Image (cartoon, rainbow, N blue to C red):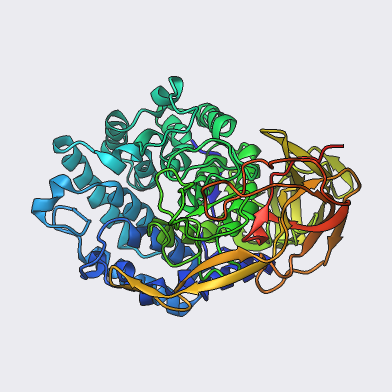
Amino acid sequence: MQKYRLFNTTELKASGWLRKQLEVQANSLSGNLDKVWPDIRESRWIGGNWDGWERVPYWLDGFIPLAYLLDDEDKIARAKKYIDAIVAGQCEDGWLCPCTVEERAKYDMWALYLIDKVLMLYYDCSGDERIPEVVYKSLKNLKDHIEQYPIFAWAHARWFECLLPIFQIYDMYKEEWLLDLAKLLRAQGMKYEEIYGDWKYKEPINQWLWESHVVNQGMAIKEGGLASLLDGEADDSFSEFMLNQLFTYHGTAVGHFTGDECLSGDSPIQGTELCGVTEAMFSYEVLYAITGNPIWADRLEKLAFNALPATISPDMWSHQYDQLVNQVACVNLAGGNNIFRTNSTESHLFGLEPNFGCCTANFNQGWPKFAMSTFMKSDDGIVSAAIAPAKLTTVIGGVNVAVESETLYPFGSSVNYIVTADGECDFTLSLRIPACAASAKVDGEDAEPGTIVTLKRVWNGTSVVKLEMDFDVKYVSRPRDMFVIERGPLVYSLAIGEEWSKLEYVRNNVERKFPYCDWEIRPTTDWQFAFAKGDIAVSETGAVSDMPFDTACPPITLDVPVVPVNWGWKEGYNMIANMVPDSVKPEGDVRTMKFIPYGSTTLRLTEIPFAAE
């Protein structure tokens, strides 16, 4: 049995800077993709001739909660158009995916896992009473289908994703065949416990493999936790073991692991796929709900505040396929060597669908699902999970209750929880204290970072609970005698001036035309520095702009002592910095440079050594 459950989008709304971020997403590529991108606009899911597999489900997985979190009637209607077409397209025998009967044997059932998960998300948001029966019938058909045609390819690697709709439908129907289906999928699916028990991927392999594919790993972090629910009590021990292996051999400075497209080591100039980031975030959200272990929410926040926004432009009209921790330019690598092991030379351009379109559809889930994880439901009350400004309105024991988190976190260090009950109401408010805090207090009483403080009270009227945190600025060691600067949940990078060059063209009958175009970015300021000894000064504006992760006006900055060194470009590559500097010998005087949150950067230097004495 899992520890926590999600509230629905009728009860939970983003506020403050988080709502601004959702509005930026709604007004940009994510909110307009169905108007311009043929894979969505003319998909086979709605009777067209374009993609009939994962792209519409991926997009809806973010677009649906985005529409409902913002109460955007236009987007709600557009989402319903897709759902209506999908429901209408279900065959009499329950088959749901858009293919002919003759194509079924070779259809990769990963798309079914995904659309069933999306349909249940839509049900939670809309209350549409058609949906449970549609998903029930599709799962019944899936069981019959895979008994004859066992799962393969992506469905084989991602079998556990189907456990999410299976568990939801089982909770409603209580029919044992659903658990039998889950066990059949586990028997046919990829055995991650065996793969990681004899792991062959400690070193990067310049070969595309299911077992080291970065998005498969990001999804599979939750495999152990989900599978444990089939056996009894929730258990995240294998998820923890798996992630430790990934961080040890392929970890990055921002709480993720490399993969361009497969696991690529711990170099700051290897790429990390955007889909891998959003899927790891979702895995952490699921694991926190299953186990209640606060470390999963800590990991979620680190990705949400760093890796996610850094690989999407501040206005969210363009995104990368791969991000680099040390990314001093984003230009097409054609004509030189390709740093990306199995991805194309344009993988770190910002654009409509650089390298491949899966991330175009799938980046949409990142922020809406994070917003849905700000508060969760426990057996005895309400849990503040991921910390961000949000407001929950619900009913407990027949009493109307609201809990609002007022905060600038991660750009600030305090949270006001405003609790309102229309009458006497006995419930527990559980507050997660981020492990990244140096110290913390709840209403003036010491609270241990990395723990959960429970406030069991009879609430009545309006009360304010204050969480105050202290964050230390610290240098965190990285491989090859490199370091990164962290403060609280944020990683900081040297701010580099940017020159954006627009690329407009047509490829495969898809037009890239502003604002749906691609971009190359070149540096306009010097970036070849090493850290120097000295104090770091913190500057906070106390406000967040209408684009919360805007490069031009970050809410918090650091003044960091650095010294020029000969860093150098990687020989044979187009504008890729060396993995480490050619020399750490100072080539000038110590100066102070501005470092900004990693998530606010497009160009950046993040992993940096100290200069020689």
Q: Is residue 487 left or right of residue 361?
A: right
Q: Which quadrant holds the C terminus?
A: top right
Answer above or below: position of 167 versus 368: above
Considering every residue shown, the one lying at the far top of the view is 198
User: In the rendering, at what x and y percent does residue 114 appear?
Assistant: 34, 52
- Foreground residue among 574 and 462: 574
User: In the rendering, at what x and y percent does residue 57 appear?
Assistant: 35, 59
Q: Is residue 122 left or right of residue 304?
A: left
User: In the rendering, at what x and y percent does residue 162 appear?
Assistant: 34, 44
**Residue found 37% across the figure and 41% down from its top:** 163
Answer above or below: position of 34 versus 136: below
- Foreground residue among 502 and 75: 502
User: In the rendering, at what x and y percent does residue 207 appear?
Assistant: 37, 36
- Foreground residue among 451 and 159: 159
Answer above or below: position of 355 versus 484: below
**Residue found 47% across the figure and 33% down from its top:** 204
Residue 374 in view of the camera: no
Answer above or below: position of 432 versus 368: above
Considering every residue shown, the one lying at the far left of the view is 102
Residue 201 falls in image quadrant: top left
Q: Is residue 458 left or right of residue 256?
A: right
Residue 496 in view of the camera: yes
Numbered-mark total: 0
